[in-house]
Image (cartoon, rainbow, N blue to C red):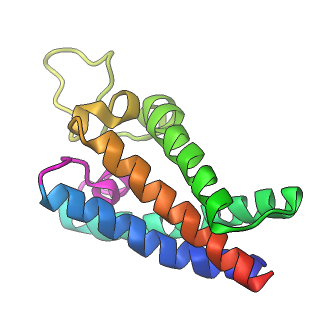
Amino acid sequence: MIWGALVGGLVGTVVLTTGLRAASELGLTRMDLPFLLGTAVSVDRARAKLIGYALHFVFGLVFALGYWVVFAATGVSNAWFGALLGLLHALFAGTALVSVVLPVVHPRMGTGFDAAGDAPLLEPPGFMLVNYGRQTQLAMIVAHIAYGAIVGGFASLAA
């Protein structure tokens, strides 16, 4: 089942990343997740984007391992349970991860405590990424539910 979860994590990350990119291109969100991740380690915008994509795929595999742990612990692995985990994943990413953790560890992200004269490279995402557009929450939730369903589906095929 672990290999199924990892393959599902890879496929799911492709779908999630493509879906969020499409949402951005359609004007539903201003969020660029690879750029957001990459600027944590590089000020060069092009390099940050490339690094961000690599990080996003690594994190996609890491989260797939987390899903696999939950599947193994519960004895349940299917697309529906994976989709539920995807919803929880989106809520975690949109709240605690971007509002609490990321601003603390990201050296180029603004916070609610920045002075008016400061000019951070990135504005703070806000709760459920609301600062990147009102449709961002929907795009993020749908993409993560799809990711979870794919990881769960692949994990159940390998069980």
- The quarter of the picture where residue 48 lies is bottom left
User: Could you say where residue 115 lies in the image, as x and y percent from the top left?
Assistant: 22, 15
User: Could you say where residue 148 lies in the image, as x and y percent from the top left?
Assistant: 57, 61
Quadrant showing the C terminus? bottom right
| Magenta segment | 27-44
Which residue in the rendered view is the most extreme toward the front? 80
User: Could you say where residue 89 lies in the image, as x and y percent from the top left?
Assistant: 56, 48
- The quarter of the picture where residue 34 lies is bottom left
- Look at the image and say whether residue 31 sits in the magenta stretch: yes
In the image, is 120 to the left or to the right of 154?
left
| Prevailing secondary structure of the magenta residues | loop
User: Could you say where residue 110 lies in the image, as x and y percent from the top left?
Assistant: 29, 30
- The quarter of the picture where residue 92 lies is top right
Which residue is painted at 12% across and 52% down in the image?
A: 27
Q: Is residue 59 visible?
A: no
In the image, is 94 to the left or to the right of 79?
left
Which residue is painted at 33% across and 55% down in the image?
A: 33
Which of the two residues, 24 or 152, is positioned nearer the viewer here? Answer: 152
Q: Height in image: 42 above or below 153?
A: above
Q: Height in image: 63 above or below 127?
A: below
Which of the two residues, 133 or 53, is positioned nearer the viewer here? Answer: 133
- Look at the image and say whether residue 70 sits in the magenta stretch: no
